Amino acid sequence: MPPNHSTSLAAWIESLITDFIDRSPLNTLENSANDRAFKTPLVGFSSGGDQLYEAYKEYVGDFHWTPKEAFENAFPSGKVNPEELTVVSWILPHIDATKVDNRKQEVFPAERWARGRIFGEKVNEDLRIHVVNSILAKGYEAVAPVQLSQWSREKSQRYVFASKWSERHAAHAAGLGTFGLCDGLITPLGKAMRTGSVIARLQIPPTSRPYSDHRAYCLFFSQGTCGKCIDRCPVGALSEAGHDKIKCLQHLSPATADYVKENYGFDGYGCGLCQTGVPCESKIPINKDLEPPGWSGPPVRGSAG
């Protein structure tokens, strides 16, 4: 594929995603104010042959798909070389009003945040379909792995449970972010976001990864400071030891599900307190972001690791 063709394909796909979020009426929280769910997204690309995907399979579990495995679930009639595939990833940052609302919460999610979790993910689903259909119409095979009937969450010996395809990990491979203490992906637009991905049988140069460590953007791991997300968790699911997925899940359901239904009038759930009211909410944090008035030094919390 000529280099200029792959470059134009990358620009075309990026415009598919950004135009959908910036212009489509489907990008909505479905509230009375008809707020948009997301601001302008980030887009990145990774190669289906990137060795990170083999590493994910090794660390997460044998059930975790490589791009080749996910793609061949959708197109089982022919084999594909991993290098023929490009994984398209995007970051959908929540609107400012959603983040402002959720910063004020101490136990349960703000209404906009809960809507962002439910109706925002519907926007994400519509975006995946839009990207896949547009690529197919251009003559290339494409699939959104999380929309495959074979996709599921599985028990993981190391991580309690994990999915067959992780869109956060695909985004990490595409240079869009690194992981924090709470397992959220910290991106240049912060971790108050949702993420999506599509695999296509076309070749686009991978986005550069400006990091070598999968936790590079988290101040707790990189500097031995911060830990603000620990204090934000209402049920003690976060500690210096990491993320207790069972406690977190038990808070999501039934506690937040009951709260959302009773107070906001729709079936949903959510939390996001560890994604808001923290230095990495809307940016890659630096130690200066921890400075309160009269600050005299960073709060050291454990080892930098």
Image (spheres, rainbow, N blue to C red):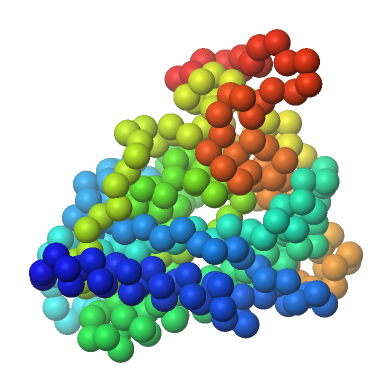
The quarter of the picture where the C terminus appears is top left
Question: Residue 233: where, in percent of width, then height?
Answer: 72, 38
Residue drawn 70% across the image and 56% down it: 96
Question: Residue 98: where, in percent of width, then height?
Answer: 73, 58
Q: Is residue 27 left or right of residue 149?
A: right
Q: Is residue 280 left or right of residue 101?
A: left
147 or 281, which is in the foreground? 281
* Snapshot quadrant of residue 115: bottom right
165 or 28, which is in the foreground? 28
Residue drawn 22% across the image and 51% down it: 50
Q: Is residue 196 above or below residue 31?
A: above
Residue 152 visible, this orientation: no
Q: Is residue 228 above or below residue 131?
A: above
Residue 167 visible, this orientation: yes
Q: Is residue 274 above or below residue 228?
A: below
As drawn, which residue projects farthest toward the right? 263
As drawn, which residue projects farthest toward the front? 4
158 or 299, which is in the foreground? 299
Residue drawn 75% across the image and 23% down it: 292
* Snapshot quadrant of residue 94: bottom right
Q: Is residue 28 above or below residue 107?
A: below
